Image (cartoon, coloured by chain):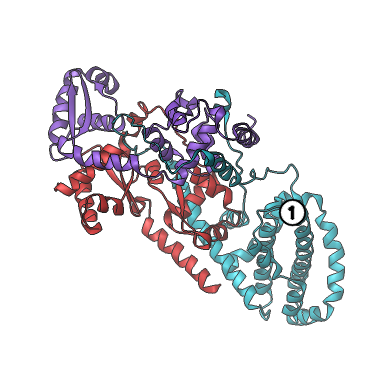
Chain colours: A cyan, B red, C purple
Amino acid sequence: METETAQFHIKQESFEGPIEVLLELIEKRKVFVNDISLASVTDDFIAYIQEKGMLPESVSSFLSVAATLLLIKARSLLPNLELTTEESESISDLERRVALYQIISEASKWLSAKYGKKIAFEGAPRNFGIVFAPDDSIKLENLSSLVVGALERVPPPAPKKPEARVFKTISISEVIDTLHERIQKALSVNFNDIIIHAEGEDQKQKKVYVIVSFLGMLELVRRGFVEAEQSANFENISLQKQDKSTSLSHESIESSYE
Amino acid sequence: MNKLATQIESLLFATADPQSIKALSSRLSVSEEEISSALQDLETSLQNHAMMLVREGQEVTLATRPEHSALIETIRKEELSKELSKASAETLSIISYYGGISKAQIEFIRGVNASYSLRALSMRGLIEARGSGRSVGYYPTLQMLEHFGVAKVEDLPEFEQTKQKITKLLTENIEAQ
Amino acid sequence: MNKLATQIESLLFATADPQSIKALSSRLSVSEEEISSALQDLETSLQNHAMMLVREGQEVTLATRPEHSALIETIRKEELSKELSKASAETLSIISYYGGISKAQIEFIRGVNASYSLRALSMRGLIEARGSGRSVGYYPTLQMLEHFGVAKVEDLPEFEQTKQKITKLLTENIEAQ
């Protein structure tokens, strides 16, 4: 019993979140948090996802951030790109989230450094001697149900860090290759409009092309993973987040480019 | 120090338990305003002593000043945890600078599920949940302040500016929703 | 109050055990004469406070002044007769079915800090701590079992199943080190 007591530690993992990754990328470039700097780290962010992959429970939040970044980038390249209210909100939300995270991350550095270093100790309770004082409202027959009640509230163990992160199982370049063609065909009319607008700037056209491919790809990947999440029954995924990522459907992408 | 302040001091000292202003008021049969003013008196009269009054929200307790930390550790037998994970430190910062924040708001800021961090911090007594259902908010505790050796949240670095920035950024979000 | 007197005060505040002048001298690396003189200093500076320095032969400790005894006694009786919180009731039940459980394990099950519950239950003679340092375990007291009319923990209702449920949960969560 004693060794068991001594060794008792709870499995606890801390995960890298999308906002944390995003702020790291922005800080690496030594720029302020705004839509321009967010647009500038879009490629890095997507490269990060491709390289490192994501944990199953954070797939939807990473993808919704990636989608918003692409929107920001698309907007910066296409001045006439009209955004839905929801898309505009997701952009300003993202800017705020990164700004908030930056503040918190600064404050937490101080807290981490000071934690437990200079403790203010509570006084010892003065010795009055122990007086046996039971509580008659606790009945013998209720004791075990009190235990069971407490046990039932214990959440399932924290998800372990999977050996292989999700994205590694998918070849992104394959997806891009197929989608490239499909999206080009499907959006050819809209693309012409865009090309007229971006006349004479081959580099820009190329970028737009890439963005649209990514938007489509992300949507498909996201849909795929929503299914995977459900079959694996991850309880931690917040429905709100899934809703948010759903806002970036093909329909809304197409209508944005019309 | 007036009589009321001394009575409060005797209670805090003898029980070594945090007391709420409300409980002190009913125990000593005076108004909460009188308790608050006596607490200020007590705080001042402890200035040259080894103890300080630690306050968070409605709760107060007596604790040793941080400069005595190393000395007291030599007589305390309990195991002290000295490490906070990055996730815990961030979650604790949010709650310390913005007491009453909801789980959804914490997740909005960090972009990851906050359940495990919140539970880990509660187990260590550093935060507590108040309210019920959708209006559950998380607050720092007296123990949180004690672990950082500060008497109140306002003593955390750049408390006011930081709180204002967070409030502004979070409020814009609520309005947008 | 000089630095030495404040250091002594912090030690006496943080432990309820009386300290000998000799022990203080060696802990603070100063002569016994210096301790004695600092104690006088401390005594004087506590004059307007609820606490006073109590000397018994070569030992000193802090205690509340006699004029506060009645107040503290009232509060204490109130504490002892009041209904246990849900947190304390659950903690007591868990300890009854799983004698020897650690504070960390109780906190893991309940998801919140157990310090206050454990203190309240100990003060009421319902549980007791055995062992020291990291291996402190909590057990129900004999009086507690007698109060429930059982001779041993195994006679508690549904003892085996309940104990097994706790064992299973704790085993699943022990980190392989």
Residue closer to the observer: B90 or A47: B90
Q: In the rendering, at what x and y percent does residue B17 appear?
A: 33, 41
Q: For the point 54% across and 35% down, which residue is it? A: C105
Name the image quarter holding the N terminus of chain A: top right
Mark 1 residue type: Gln
Given residues C137 and A56, the one toward you in this image is: C137
Q: Is residue A248 visible?
A: yes
Query: With B53 as the anchor, is C94 left or right in this view?
Result: right
Neighbour class for label 1 at 10 Å: few (<14), some, many (≥20)? some
Q: Chain of mark 1?
A: A
Give x and y (percent) for residue A85. 62, 77
The one nearer the camera, A6 or C136, is C136
Residue C111: horizontal and vertical position, in percent?
53, 44
Residue drawn at point x = 70 percent, y = 61 percent? A63
Is B125 left or right of A23, judged from the image as shown? left
Quadrant housing residue A221: bottom right
State left or right for residue A166 relative to residue C161: right
Q: Secondary structure at mark 1?
A: helix
In the figure, B79 relative to B58: above or below? above
Q: In which image quadrant can residue A145 be found?
A: top right
Q: Is residue A31 left or right of residue C69?
A: right
Report which residue position mark 1 lands on: A50
Question: Taking the image as drawn, is residue C46 in sight?
Answer: no
